Amino acid sequence: MLERLGRVGLDVESIDALLVTHEHSDHVSGVVRFAARFGIPVVLTHGTLAALGELPAAAPAFRVIDSHAAFALGDFEILPYPVPHDAREPVQFVFSDGAARLGVLTDCGRITPHVAEVLGGCNALVLECNHDPDLLRASSYPAMLKRRIAGNFGHLDNTQAAGLLAQVDQRRLQHVVAAHLSEENNRPELACQALAAVLGCAPDWVAVASQENGVGWRQLG
């Protein structure tokens, strides 16, 4: 975490809170220890907190949020919204400073009308493009895991992410980032092509967040 903050020119003192979407290990491993070590509050739903199980004595401060109610954090209004995923009470977030809106969607099995409504009118979107259906079917993953990933409570494929873009109000959209790509079951060029086809732009206009390096800063306004 400290290394990744350093890559984008930040230090731990700049973190006001850690927002947790759900309790799966690739999202919470290390969160409690990191937050406790540096005195950073953790923001999460009641279901996610309950799913963490027994906590260490040196646990951080937790701020439990309603999955449908906006809350303030510093100069930002943050709107959590529930998503279909195989977790206890999973949410994703839309961030706003009153002028610009950033919508984030990963770990979602299907697009609901509420998801499309919440993400409409954003200036930037970070969208899960987890897999290509053909690559997933041909992969070395066990059959049960393939069904979970492709199911209604699993992860969005490139076509589903593109379908969401086709539904939302794009008039203010300045940036689109493809995220949460599977290293085995997807390719960056496939995700970019799917999203670009809906946006009517060149594939290289769509950014890709990698597991190793994330994505660079983007200016909204």
Image (cartoon, rainbow, N blue to C red):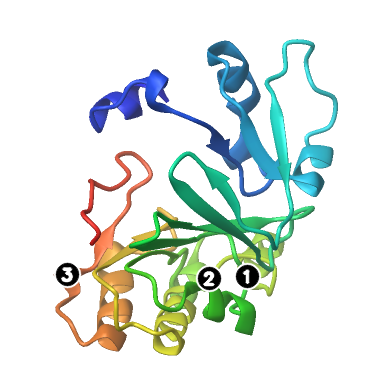
Image quarter where the N terminus lies is: top left
Earlier-in-chain disc, 2 versus 3: 2
Q: Determine which residue is flagged by label 3.
A: 205
> Residues at badges 2 and 1 in contact (C-beta under 8 Å)?
yes
Residue beneath the point at 69% across and 56% down = 90
Say what secondary structure mark 1 lies in. loop
Q: Determine which residue is flagged by label 1.
A: 109
Front-most of residues 122 and 176: 122
Q: Is residue 14 above or below residue 68?
A: above
Image quarter where the C terminus lies is: bottom left
Which tag is nearer the camera, tag 2 or tag 3?
Answer: 3
Earlier-in-chain disc, 3 versus 1: 1
Front-most of residues 74 and 168: 74
Check disc 1 and give the amino acid type. Answer: Gly
Q: Determine which residue is flagged by label 2.
A: 156
> Residues at badges 3 and 1 in contact (C-beta under 8 Å)?
no
Residue 123 visible, this angle = yes
Earlier-in-chain disc, 2 versus 1: 1
Q: Pinpoint residue 49: horizontal percent, then vertical percent.
A: 78, 38
Q: Pinpoint residue 209: horizontal percent, then vertical percent.
A: 32, 52
Residue beneath the point at 52% across and 59% down = 106
